[in-house]
Image (cartoon, rainbow, N blue to C red):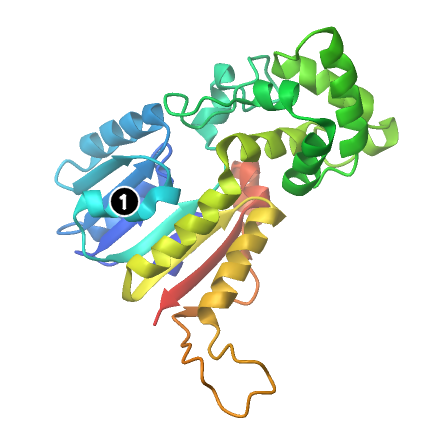
Amino acid sequence: MFKECKEALGLTQGETYCDCTLGGAGHALGIAREIEPGGLLIGIDQDDFALQTAKSRLAEEHPDLEFIPLYGNFSDLDDLLVEAEVVGVDGFLFDLGVSSPQLDIPERGFSYAREAPLDMRMSPGKQTINAAEIINTSNAADLTRILREYGEERWASRIVELIVKARRVKPLETTTELTELIKAAIPAGARRAGGNPAKRTFQALRIAVNDEINALKNGLDAALRWLNPGGRIVVLSYHSLEDRIVKEAFARAAKGCVCPPEAPICVCGHEPIIIKHTRKPLCAGEDEILANPRAKSARLRAATKR
């Protein structure tokens, strides 16, 4: 959805933009074309392989661009931007979830379509807890909560029941083992719709492994602080839980007085800090979905700093 991102960001030559989820640099390359000459692009990624790949692509295609690559998670956005020595940012882009390159590297364990170790860490060099540890050591109640809350999996209890039974014999170690177990747990009728039945469980585990919900909340709060007046923030989310968090964060930031309704006058002094662009999120068009099926679940929300 780069066309929609470009319009929502209001990309302008010579300004400063931050791609908080650099990935393979797909969006970053598009931003670079619009802000040269004189613009500054900051790229953040917690996956060192992705960061180095993006750095090479940008150096090759935009050798004159001022680009600052930063290794880390956008949950630490305050510290990362201090490291970059910027005083403010004109636009932030968050493209949430797992990137295509990560899905396409089997050994990372993000994909239920290929056999690999149950890993799912975005930053293997910094993280110690992986999906296998969560699956094999969490108690049944915690595991059920993870699948329900992060994956919105209606068959969470049944899946966890089979996981607990299986791990008594031997620990679950591969994506294939987990996928087959999920298929056995979900009734045949429920498996006929909604794509691969493992999708929601894998999503939930990835979110838990990488603490994505807290990272998103922290990153959004920090981005709103660093935005220059008139600056834009754009967020692409891919499931309802992420979109709800973005929606609620924007609603709080756009809200004025927070005094109780019965208060005769405002005493809180709270002022709205953003203007929301749309009431409902934007979705990918049919042509883009045909070209890139992963765009089907994308939801875009944007706002401008007052």
- 271 left or right, relative to 11: right
Q: Nearer the viewer, residue 114 or 256?
A: 256
The furthest residue to the bottom: 264
- 16 left or right, relative to 93: left
Q: Residue at x 55, y 37 (%)?
A: 294
Quarter of the image with the C terminus is bottom left
Q: Residue at x 47, y 86 (%)?
A: 266
Q: Which amino acid is tagged 1?
A: Asp
How many circles with numbers are drawn on the protein?
Answer: 1
Binning the other alpha carbons within 10 Å of mark 1 as few (below 14), some (14 to 19) or many (20 upward) gives few
- Residue 284's place in the image compared with 192, above or below, is below
Q: Residue at x 61, y 11 (%)?
A: 173
- Residue 88's place in the image compared with 269, above or below, is above
**What percent of the width, then of the height, locates residue 151?**
66, 38
Quarter of the image for residue 164 reads top right
Element type where label 1 sits in the image: helix
Q: Which residue is mark 1?
A: 79
Quarter of the image for residue 145 reads top right
Asked if one can make out residue 2 in the rendered structure from this viewpoint, the answer is no
Asked if one can make out residue 84 in the rendered structure from this viewpoint, the answer is yes
- 81 left or right, relative to 3: left
Quarter of the image for residue 116 reads top right
Q: Nearer the viewer, residue 275 or 297?
A: 275
- Residue 256's place in the image compared with 118, above or below, is below
**What percent of the width, then of the height, locates residue 109?**
54, 19
**What percent of the width, then of the height, locates residue 163?**
74, 20
**What percent of the width, then of the height, locates residue 270?**
42, 77
